[in-house]
Amino acid sequence: MKFYYVTFRSVTFAQQGERVLQKKGIRCTLLRTPKWMEAQGCGYSLRLWTADIRPALAVLQQEQVPFRKIWIQRRDGQLEVWEE
């Protein structure tokens, strides 16, 4: 199973993102972002299923919830920055 991780600079923005996505019926899980994923540290992220990433990004942008980066889980389980 593949997941995407959308990182935020604060728990407030991550919680806001979680709320707007859940209102639209998009499943996500709020997590503390591992320090190696977040250059400035102290970040939070939302984990999303592969099928939900595009609708989730559209909702976050429409609702003006600022996020930092998007990470994708590769087949081997490692994470890398997703650049579309």
Image: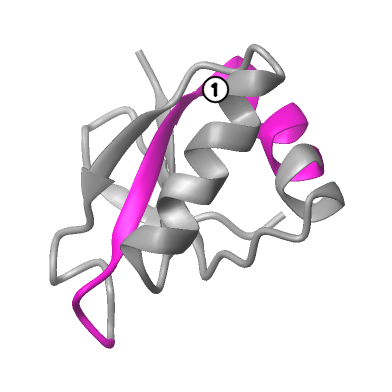
Please, is residue 41 above or below residue 51 in the view?
Answer: below
Which of 71 and 77 lies nearest the eye of the viewer?
71
Q: Which residues are magenta?
A: 40-58
Q: Is residue 69 visible?
A: yes
Magenta span has 8?
A: no
Magenta span has 46?
A: yes
Figure quadrant of residue 26: top right
Q: Quadrant of the C terminus?
A: bottom right
Please provide percent x and percent y for residue 16. 53, 48
Figure quadrant of residue 20: top right
Task: Tell me the residue at 40%/41% (across/down).
Answer: 46
Figure quadrant of residue 82: bottom right
Please provide percent x and percent y for residue 61. 79, 54
Q: Is residue 6 visible?
A: no
Q: Residues within 10 Å of mark 1 (few under 14, many from 20)?
A: some
Amino acid identity at mark 1: Thr
Please, is residue 38 above or below residue 44 in the view?
Answer: below
